[in-house]
Image (spheres, helix red, strand yellow):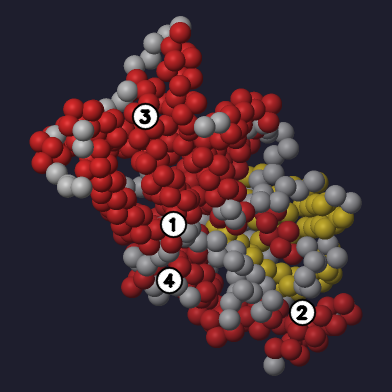
């Protein structure tokens, strides 16, 4: 059972987001406890990516509250530089992994990983190097430390991107369809790294199309459609015996296509 | 017709001085126009139109008028009130001229950096300025390299225009030597060969830089 007295690592209350006339998030509530892994699935356009991006304010929400470890992320009361300082500090505690990796092409693999700790935490070069090599080791790419992103495969790029996000020692990791842009044979190496994080009890919020992976790795699964959470449950229940017809239809299509 | 290169040999130290002046001016103009071009591009892109219109006007002005006219204007036109030393006019004039062209390149390459790069940097906790400094500008610089080095090769040839305001660069000193020795053919050929060699070196540099920059952008 969930311990409701503990401060959740991430909490969303009544989050709403509009793009023009289109309401893409229609009041989302979500709670991620420390060390928990939550997967969000759903058809494209369901709002799941927008939701994830809202958590670190890459999308600015219109209504509701987002909290990271008890600290409010969205702060409509703060303007300009004051908000900039606030959000930069918040974001240092959240790692984000993107569908298209977004590695910095002008930096080597190691420099990609060490840029943030060096510039934001003032870590000295040798400490940063040690941290960077540890992280590259962890994602199995210490031999590529000097390589530039253009010389890496998609799977390797994404593993470096994960290492880069981990370098700031975040409290939570956000994965925005981390394997969707990868060739099928490269998906597994990234999934392995994410499973490794799960075993170390990293708090994770995962938006994914990989149903099997979501079922294996997460503690809690949510199905979103049309800007609302249609159904949420333990992955065993949600993937095997979904209660809602929309969930059933979605899963039939996707699990069918996967096997 | 007989060729006699002995006057060239005789005036070799003078010619070398001209080469030195050309190279020094080239270096100064390159530094000024590249750094300045980047600053102009950033201000143009990141400030409101109301604020940056003087800069856009400046780019437009320098790109739509001939270099020679700009130099004459700075030296003789403004010289009616303040006499700026020729060498300063030369460096500033060429510098502003190529700053405008370089700014144009940087505006395009800064725009070409994808939004994903901004998002990745912001999501790590970097602010707007830090993102610009650590992520956007280095990439835009790498992408600008091929066109920048082209501009710089053209610029070095344009330094010869500065002879019009009496700066002792290569063409100017050869004019002087010719006026004494009456051997224009030999001197012009020599100057052409020296220009060719300078170009050759710059092209080698360009190839090296582009190869480095291509896999980093």
Give me the residue at 34% from left, 28% from top. Answer: B163
Q: Nearer the viewer, residue B166 or A61?
A: B166
The residues tagged by marks 2 and 3 sit, at their Cα atoms, a distance apart of 77 Å
Q: Residues within 10 Å of mark 3 (few under 14, many from 20)?
A: many
- Splitting the image into 4 quarters, where does residue B170 fall? top left
Say whether marks 2 and 4 touch (CB < 8 Å). Answer: no
Residue B84 to residue A114: above or below: above
- The label nearer to you, 2 versus 4, is 4
Task: Identify the residue under disc 4.
Answer: A151
Residue B10 located left or right of residue A27: left
Q: Earlier in the sequence, mark 2 or mark 1?
A: 1
Q: Residues within 10 Å of mark 4 (few under 14, many from 20)?
A: some
Q: Could you say which disc has been placed on residue B162 in the image? A: 3
Asked if badges 2 and 4 are on one and the same chain, I answer: yes
Give me the residue at 55% from left, 65% from top. Answer: A101
Q: Nearer the viewer, residue A28 or B214?
A: B214
Residue A208 located left or right of residue B103: right
Task: Identify the residue under disc 1.
Answer: A106
Residue B187 percent location from the top left of the image: 22, 40
Q: What chain letter is assigned to the residue under label 2?
A: A
């Amino acid at each position: 059972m969930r311990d409701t007295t503990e401060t959740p690592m991430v909490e969303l209350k009544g989050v709403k987001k509009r793009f023009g006339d289109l309401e893409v998030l229609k009041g989302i509530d979500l709670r991620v406890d420390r060390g928990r892994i939550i997967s969000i699935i759903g058809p494209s356009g369901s709002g799941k990516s927008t939701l994830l991006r809202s958590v670190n304010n890459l999308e600015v929400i219109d209504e509701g509250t987002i909290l990271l470890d008890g600290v409010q992320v969205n702060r409509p009361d703060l303007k300009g530089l004051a908000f900039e300082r606030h959000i930069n500090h918040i974001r240092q505690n959240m790692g984000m992994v993107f569908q298209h990796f977004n590695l910095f092409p002008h930096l080597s693999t190691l420099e990609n990983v060490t840029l943030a700790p060096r510039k934001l935490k003032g870590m000295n070069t040798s400490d940063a190097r040690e941290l960077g090599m540890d992280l590259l080791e962890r994602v199995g790419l210490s031999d590529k430390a000097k390589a530039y992103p253009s010389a890496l495969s998609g799977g390797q790029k994404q593993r470096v991107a994960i290492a880069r996000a981990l370098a700031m020692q975040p409290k939570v990791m956000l994965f925005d369809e981390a394997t969707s842009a990868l060739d099928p044979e490269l998906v597994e190496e990234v999934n392995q790294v994410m499973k490794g994080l799960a075993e170390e009890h990293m708090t994770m919020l995962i938006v994914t199309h990989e149903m099997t992976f979501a079922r294996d790795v997460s503690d809690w699964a949510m199905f979103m459609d049309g800007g609302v959470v249609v159904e949420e449950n333990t992955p065993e229940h949600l993937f095997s015996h979904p209660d809602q017809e929309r969930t059933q239809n979605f899963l039939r299509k996707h699990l069918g296509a996967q096997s | 017709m007989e060729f006699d290169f002995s006057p060239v040999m005789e005036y070799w130290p003078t010619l070398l001085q001209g080469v030195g002046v050309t190279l020094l001016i080239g270096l100064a103009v390159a530094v000024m126009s590249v750094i300045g071009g980047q600053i102009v591009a950033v201000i143009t892109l990141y400030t409101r139109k109301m604020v940056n219109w003087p800069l856009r006007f400046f780019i437009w002005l320098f790109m739509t008028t001939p270099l020679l006219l700009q130099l004459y204007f700075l030296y003789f036109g403004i010289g009616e009130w303040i006499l700026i030393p020729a060498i300063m006019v030369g460096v500033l004039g060429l510098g502003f001229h190529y700053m405008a062209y370089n700014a144009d390149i940087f505006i395009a390459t800064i725009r070409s950096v994808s939004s994903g790069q901004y998002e990745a940097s912001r999501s790590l906790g970097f602010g707007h300025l830090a993102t610009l400094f650590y992520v956007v500008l280095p990439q835009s610089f790498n992408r600008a390299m091929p066109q920048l080095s082209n501009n710089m090769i053209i610029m070095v040839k344009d330094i010869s225009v500065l002879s019009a305001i009496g700066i002792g660069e290569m063409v100017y000193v050869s004019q002087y030597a010719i006026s004494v020795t009456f051997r224009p053919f030999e001197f012009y050929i020599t100057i052409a060969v020296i220009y060719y060699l300078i170009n050759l070196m710059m092209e080698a540099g360009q190839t090296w830089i582009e190869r480095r920059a291509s896999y980093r952008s």
